[in-house]
Image: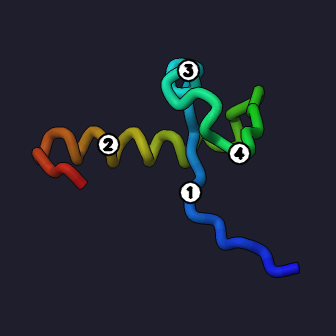
Amino acid sequence: MKREPIVAVAFLTEANMKAVGNNLKRIYPIEDVSPFEDLLEKLDKADREMRTSGSNR
């Protein structure tokens, strides 16, 4: 069986999940985000930098 390529991985808040509704095929809730703290910090920093630079990427 051929596997489909992964096209997206997302960290969503509960509010994001409510906005998306039932449009996602698979959801894996994460209770302990500590293994992802470094990644989340880097994503937050990149988001802040993008917002201050005026970039829409």
Q: Indicate the colouring scheme.
A: rainbow
> Which residue carries the number 4 mark?
25
Q: Position of residue 43 (x, y in %)?
A: 43, 46
> Which residue carries the number 2 mark?
47
- The residue at the point 55 percent across, 20 percent down is 18
Q: Position of residue 11 (x, y in %)?
A: 57, 39
Reply above or below: 24 against 32: below
Front disc: 1 or 3: 3
Outermost right residue: 1
Instruction: Name which residue type carries label 3.
Output: Lys
Few, some or many C-alpha atoms within 10 Å of disc 1 (few <14, some 14-19, many ≥20)? few
Tell me how far mark 1 sits from mark 3, CA to CA: 18 Å
- The residue at the point 33 percent across, 48 percent down is 46
- Total labels: the figure holds 4
Is 22 on the left or on the right of 29, as rendered? Answer: left
Tell me how far mark 2 sits from mark 1, CA to CA: 18 Å
Tell me how far mark 2 sits from mark 4, CA to CA: 26 Å
| SS category of the residue bearing label 2 | helix
Is 8 on the left or on the right of 28, as rendered? Answer: left
- For marks 1 and 4, the one nearer the N-term is 1
Instruction: Name which residue type carries label 4.
Output: Lys
| SS category of the residue bearing label 1 | loop
Instruction: Name which residue type carries label 1.
Output: Ala
> Which residue carries the number 1 mark?
8
